[in-house]
Each structure stands twice: as C-alpha cells, then as structure tokens.
Image (tube, rainbow, N blue to C red):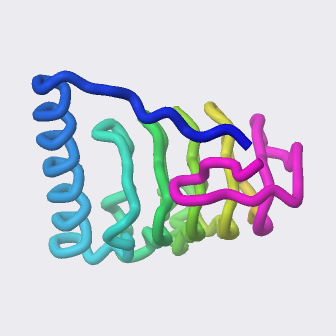
C-alpha cells in the first residue's frame, strides 16, 4: 500500500491557505448563525458554492462533506411554488458545477460527478453523474471529504 505524499508549500502559500480556511469557516458559521442552515462545522465548500437562501433552513449538509466550486444546493422551485429540505450525507463529495435540486436526499459516502443535475434521491455508498444524474458505481467507501478508499 502506498503512502500519501503531502505537498510541500512555501511560506506564502501556507499563509494563503490559512487565510482561505479562516474565510471559509467564517462563511460556514455565518450561514449557520444568520440563515439557520444545518451545516456541520467540519463541512467545507468553495467560495463559489451557492446555497439557497430563499429557504435556508432546508439546507442540510453532513460532516466531512465537500462541495466543489460552482456547485448549487437548491431548496425551492419558484415556478411550482415548491419548498423542500435538501439533505447531503456525511463524507460526500459534490463535484464542480453540480446542481442538487430541492427535496433530494444524498446518502452517506457518495460522490456526485462534476456538472451533474441530481433530481432524485441517491443511496449510500455510490457515485452518480450525468444530467439527470444516474448511478454509475455502487459499494464505494470514502473517507473525509469524499476521498475514495481503495
């Protein structure tokens, strides 16, 4: 089994990463305190991730989940006058520019492919991708932030 090689960063990069992590954790705290979103403190997301503020109490994100840049979590549909809670489980990875539609429940240890549109519930331990998202692999195991365990 090969060991993970941790990247070596210079002092400027380390300062930048610490600053970025502080900003992102402050943003997560703000979403929880101001909007009442149910986001676990260990969850991480990019600065360009969009969380629905129309029905903010409907956003539920589990521990050690990561939402990549441009991903969107919706909890309402204005055309149908529909508001529903959206749940994302623990140790999940939501790919870049993925869209999670209102009322969807994503299980624990799931990976959502980049650019996917998730319109129905996703069971635990699987990978989904596409528009609409379909299961492409089941029985996976992930560690923190949706990294696949081999």
Residue at figure coordinates x 15%, y 48% from the top left? 23
Q: Position of residue 2 (x, y in %)?
A: 68, 38
Q: Is residue 113 above or below residue 100?
A: above
Q: Position of residue 137 (x, y in %)?
A: 88, 48
* Residue 132, image quadrant: top right
Residue at figure coordinates x 35%, y 41% from the top left? 46
Residue 97: in sight, yes or no? no
Q: Position of residue 22 (x, y in %)?
A: 15, 51
Residue 105: in sight, yes or no? yes
* Residue 56, image quadrant: bottom left
* Residue 87, image quadrant: bottom right
- Range of the magenta residues? 123-150
Q: Which of 74 and 42 lies nearest the eye of the viewer?
A: 42
Residue at figure coordinates x 74%, y 43% from the top left? 1
Query: Within the magenta stretch, is there residue 135?
Result: yes
Left or right: 11 in relation to 86: left
Q: Is residue 120 above or below residue 10?
A: below
Left or right: 144 in relation to 138: left
């Amino acid at each position: 089994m090969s060991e993970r090689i941790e990247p070596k960063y210079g002092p400027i990069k380390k300062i930048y990463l610490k600053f970025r992590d502080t900003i992102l954790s402050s943003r997560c705290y703000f979403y929880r305190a101001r909007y009442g979103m149910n986001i676990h403190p260990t969850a991480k997301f990019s600065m360009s991730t969009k969380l629905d503020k129309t029905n903010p109490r409907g956003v539920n994100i589990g521990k050690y989940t990561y939402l990549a840049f441009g991903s969107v979590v919706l909890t309402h549909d204005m055309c149908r006058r529909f508001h529903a809670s959206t749940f994302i489980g623990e140790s999940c990875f939501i790919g870049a520019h993925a869209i999670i539609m209102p009322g969807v429940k994503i299980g624990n240890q799931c990976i959502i492919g980049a650019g996917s549109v998730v319109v129905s519930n996703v069971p635990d331990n699987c990978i989904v991708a596409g528009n609409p998202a379909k299961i492409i692999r089941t029985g996976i195991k992930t560690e923190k932030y949706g990294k696949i365990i081999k």
